[in-house]
């Protein structure tokens, strides 16, 4: 029974809940979308296919990059193909500027990516089934 409950919780962390209302977050001039979790500990940047005038994703995009500040700085990058990449020591990075907050219980989506913000953390997936969960307590990728 305990194993079944743990498996159910794991699945819920990876699959955004159907009742989570979509939150609209406007794109910047070059199509990037930035948002933070309400705690301010996690910040994400969506870069559309083709990138911007100053940044091009490794495979041409689109790309979702999320960073966590505490307890240690980590970055997770999710592209349109393959699993998410966890960078455990990205060096000192700017994170979590004063941008739109993805409210707890809300979801966001752009391109092949969707995320859901909860009080437990941020779960993001791509249409290819790969994704990640990031919180103060842990980071997992698939």
Image: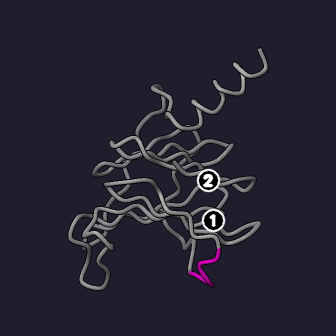
Q: Which residue is mark 1?
A: 68
Q: Position of residue 64 (x, y in %)?
A: 41, 61
Question: Pointer 1: residues within 10 angstroms few (<14), some, or many (20+)?
Answer: many
Relative horizontal placement of residue 99, taking residue 13 as reference (left or right)? left
Q: Main secondary structure of the magenta part?
A: loop
Residue range in magenta is 89-93
Relative horizontal placement of residue 23, taking residue 134 as reference (left or right)? left
Q: Are marks 2 and 1 in contact (CB under 8 Å)?
A: yes
In the image, residue 46 lies in the stretch drawn in magenta: no
Question: Pointer 2: residues within 10 angstroms few (<14), some, or many (20+)?
Answer: many
**Nearer-N-terminus badge (2/1):** 1
Which residue does the image show at 40% across and 39% down from the upper left?
22
Q: Secondary structure at mark 2?
A: strand
Q: Is residue 36 above or below residue 28?
A: above
Q: Which residue is mark 2?
A: 134
Relative horizontal placement of residue 141, taking residue 108 as reference (left or right)? right
Which residue does the image show at 63% across and 65% down from the upper left?
68
């Amino acid at each position: 029974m305990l194993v079944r409950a743990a498996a159910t919780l794991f699945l819920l962390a990876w699959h955004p809940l159907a009742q989570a209302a979509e939150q609209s977050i406007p794109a910047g001039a070059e199509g990037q979308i930035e948002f933070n979790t309400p705690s301010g500990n996690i910040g994400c940047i969506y870069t559309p296919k083709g990138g911007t005038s100053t940044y091009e994703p490794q495979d041409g995009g689109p790309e979702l990059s999320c960073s966590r500040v505490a307890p240690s700085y980590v970055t997770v990058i999710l592209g349109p193909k393959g699993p998410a990449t966890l960078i455990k020591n990205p060096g000192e990075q700017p994170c979590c500027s004063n941008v739109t907050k993805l409210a707890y219980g809300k979801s966001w989506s752009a391109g092949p990516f969707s995320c859901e913000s909860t009080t437990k953390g941020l779960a993001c997936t791509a249409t290819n089934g790969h994704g990640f969960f990031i919180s103060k307590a842990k980071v997992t990728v698939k």
